[in-house]
Amino acid sequence: MKKIDFPITTIFPLIFFVILLAVNLSFHRIGDYGAETNFFGLYVPQAQSLLHGHMLVGDYHGPVYPILLALAYLLIKNFLSAGIFLATASAALTVFLALKLIRQVFDSKKAFGAVALLALNPVFIQYSYSAGSDMFFVLLVTLSLYFLLKSKSFSWTNLILASVAAALAYLTRYNGIAIVAAAFIIFIIINHWQLQLKKRILVSFIFVSLFLICISPWGVYCLRQKGNFFFNQNYKTAACELYAKGRVTYEQFWFDNQTLNIDSFADVLTYDPILLGKRLVFNLARNFVKHMKSLVGWPFAAFVIIGFIYSIFSRPTKAQWSLYVYSFLFYCVLLFVIYDPRYSIFLVICYSILIMNGIQFVGKVLRNRQAETWLASVLVVLTALVSFGFNKKNISSGPVEVKKAAAWYQQNIPPEERGKILLARKPHLAYYTNMESRVIPLATSVDDLQNKVQLLQGDYLFISPIEIYYRENLKVLLEPKNAPSSFIPVYRDANPPAVLYRIKRTPQ
């Protein structure tokens, strides 16, 4: 019988997946108020709609992740567990691809060091258990780059697969369009495959054409449903980041329709070009500083900087330049949106490579190759320790008040009194109680809230610490005696403080 050989590139990601999945499903029982706000508020409703035979068009993302989530739900029968499974599997596959990619573009030693730093990175681990599209998007972006750089010689198969992966990334998150720009630079300017100019142009044309063909079914659907082939409202995200500060608050922009009369991405570019330029330059520096602080960690920042400088002067190969340019374009597209470490997870791959470059430089200065191994080992162990402490705190940090309120609701509210619409700042309780989630409107007072709630036709109102954080003037509602007569308290908890009100409809 022929012996089956499992290379380390397969064994390590597989072990990583099995261990991580067991830990993630065991300890991450309640969705948190970070990425999982979008999961419960956007992706789950879309997946539920799909399971009932209808495709919803999301304002800020494409259909791929909701489709995948719906399929996973059919097997797992729980949306949160399905989301955790998809995130963990995506993380393991990203580790697998990153290991193969870096071995191809650099060398095995650098690949194992960089991938160890990636796999143990605190933020990378965090989003392996946070349900949402973050890690799946990272997987697709890495997959497209892998096929672009898989071989030193041109291959139509790799080109096609890279384009399909790019389209899937775009249909997961629309900032995946950066892959097309990066591929164009790789084909035309860097010329990693060393092709003649005519063939470079042809390759670029085929890549873009196939990309457009792949996204066309969704584009046609958006055209029919929304009147725009490229429908999405991410221009609002850019407008909020670039122009809202000093004009309106975050809550006013998103939940009081104070969007500065910006209705398209063209409006974003022309609203205030001078301020736009200043903000982008500021964000260029701000994001790097925040990456060093929250994505990489300050002890590693020195090696990132040393590695970056060393990379420039060490004459990178065309494939290495391609990886750097690809990463930099993703860095640039994030200048338009509010900073969040999860948006930048893909860049951990590049930062880990730069750290290894920095270690290599130190080894050359010391003229001691053994020092490189020891230094890399120390940084990997330090990363593991930081990650353990960070994720030990975060993996089970979800709002327990939500789970307690949901359990009480399911046990004590008879079916005929259960509602259809729940008003809260976050969608979590609505998910656990099978209600539609709507955001508590901005209100100047409790009386003003009472009037607006009636217009929204809400059935229940939930007040907890997160609602008070965003609606401080509603803190009085944590004490039911301060509530108007149309807010009937049905559940109250003291630790953490939370009140669930049934809303009594009043004649309009």
Image (cartoon, rainbow, N blue to C red):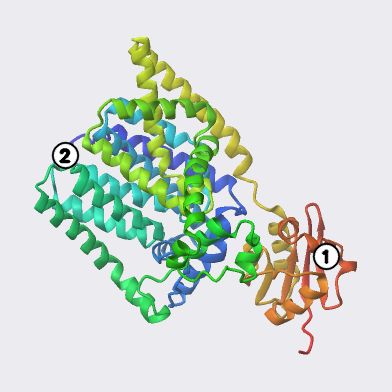
**Towards the viewer: 393 or 158:** 158
The mark that comes first in sequence, 2 or 1, is: 2
**Residue type at numbered disc 1:** Leu
Pointer 1 local density, CA inside 10 Å: few below 14, some 14–19, many at least 20: many
**Towards the viewer: 25 or 215:** 215
Q: For residue 468, which quarter of the picture?
A: bottom right
**Residue type at numbered disc 2:** Lys
- Point out the image quarter for the N terminus: top left
**Towards the viewer: 508 or 49:** 508
* Image position of 341 with respect to 103: above or below: below
How far apart are the two marked residues, 2 and 1, measured between alpha carbons?
65 Å
Please tell me the numbered disc located at residue 118: none
Q: Position of residue 142 (x, y in %)?
A: 34, 46
Q: For residue 493, which quarter of the picture?
A: bottom right
Single out the residue that lies furthest toward the bottom. Answer: 507
Secondary element at tag 2: loop
- Point out the image quarter for the C terminus: bottom right
* Image position of 134 with respect to 247: above or below: above
Please tell me the numbered disc located at residue 477: 1
Q: Where is residue 222 in the image (x, y as percent from the top left)?
A: 38, 75
- Image point 78% across, 69% down: which residue? 444
Residue 417 visible from this viewpoint: yes
Single out the residue that lies furthest toward the front. Answer: 274
User: Label 2: which residue?
Assistant: 152
Q: In this view, does 384 lie to the left or right of 220?
A: right
Q: Is residue 142 left or right of residue 35?
A: left
